[in-house]
Image (spheres, rainbow, N blue to C red):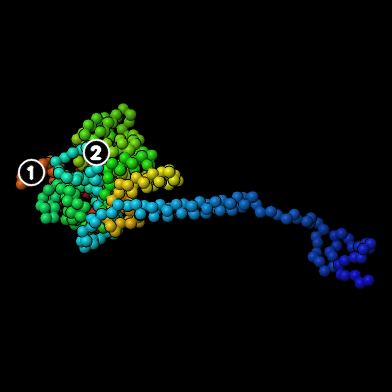
Amino acid sequence: MPVRRGTYPVGSQSTQSPHEPVPGGPELNPEQPRQPKRSRPRWRRILGWTVVVIVVVLALIAARVAWLWNDVSSQLHRVDALSGATDTPGETWLIVGSDARGGAVQDETEGARADSVMLLHKAENGQTSLTSLPRDTFVDIPELGENKINAAYTGGPKLLVQTVEKLSGLTVDHYVEVGMTGVSQMVDAVGGVDVCWPYSVVDEDSGMVWDVSQGECQTVDGTKALAYSRMRKSDPTGDVGRGQRQRAVISAVVSKAASPSTIFSFSRQDALVDAGTDVLTVDQSASTMSIAQMVLAFRSASGSGLTGAPPIEDTAYSPEDADIGETVLLRDTTAPDFFAKVRDGKLTAADFNQF
């Protein structure tokens, strides 16, 4: 019977040594034992599963962001606000706190009132600045003449935009109005914010009660944050100091909204979206992207310290030809230069009003 190479008939015995290679097979080293088959190292398996988990989490976050993006865009309130003026360099947002006051903080202006007027600008060189215009700022309102800036807001968003453009020389690209009572909702949505005040206050008009024995800096809820941002009469700097506190509250909300405690909390995200879309009114061309860019610019300006009021000549100026009460008069000699620096991205902290 023919025998195949490398095999033996049944019952036969091999005369080869167990360490001798089988004819036609691989050579064996008698001094080297067979190596067991190695499995994949445990750390590599763990790393592989970690990558899978990260990819899944990122996919879920991306889906969540896309859903929130569309949800915000569909719920925004819109208004015809832009003037259509020739564009100027950079990107400019006019942010207005509306007068949904519930009876608090009255002044002499009839009709609608603005609690705050802020001009946020990102220059072509990337510099961002946030300028607060006191609501009693003495301005020249197109077709109405000289009055408080609040009087321009009474005439509607478009007239306010035109007034600010005439004052600053900057074309407003986007208009964002925030109902001040909504500040309370947004603060609560992010779990409260930290604000500071150096002395005890009991202010009946705004409702602010501050006990400095509990610390100059405190974590406040929405109700107290709203009173803090509205208080004026107990502040020796009046409307200017009030603007500083409003910027502080909004900046704190923006920081908390961008923090991990909000980003990884769906409940806080939902509460923030509901609060924001309920109180935000924007121009017709504004998108979720432009609002996101505004938030980033606001945060950048707050972080760089380029925030404040323009140079002020008199915080209690009473015009002779107009019976409108006391106003805030900007300096004729420096205010135009100030807004030129805003436009060109050449501002320093020293350019803002100094007390």
Residue visible at 28% across and 38% down in the picture:
226
| Residue assigned mark 2 | 102
Of the two numbered discs 1 and 2 in the rendering, the one whose residue sits closer to the viewer: 2
Q: What is the C-alpha distance between the residues marked 1 and 2?
A: 27 Å
Instruction: Quadrant for the C terminus, please.
Output: top left
> Is residue 189 at all visible to an observer of this figure?
yes
Counting from the top left corner in percent of width and height, residue 141 is at 13, 52
Counting from the top left corner in percent of width and height, residue 333 is at 13, 51
Counting from the top left corner in percent of width and height, residue 10 is at 92, 63
Residue 24 vs 210, above or below: the answer is below
The picture quadrant where one finds residue 318 is top left
Residue visible at 22% across and 37% down in the picture:
104
Instruction: Work out whether mark 1 precedes mark 2 in sequence or the reverse, and give the earlier one.
Output: 2
| Residue assigned mark 1 | 323
Residue 239 lies left or right of residue 265; in this view the side is: left
User: Helix or strand or loop: what does disc 2 sit on?
Assistant: loop
- The crowding category of the residue bearing disc 1, from other C-alpha atoms within 10 Å (few below 14, some 14 to 19, many at least 20), is few
How many badges with numbers are in the image? 2
Which residue is situated farthest in the left direction here? 321
Counting from the top left corner in percent of width and height, residue 126 is at 31, 56
Residue visible at 65% across and 52% down in the picture:
41
Residue 33 lies left or right of residue 95; in this view the side is: right
Q: What is the three-letter code of the residue carrying label 1?
A: Asp
Closer-to-camera residue (215/17): 215
- The crowding category of the residue bearing disc 2, from other C-alpha atoms within 10 Å (few below 14, some 14 to 19, many at least 20), is few
Q: What is the three-letter code of the residue carrying label 2?
A: Gly
Closer-to-camera residue (122/65): 65
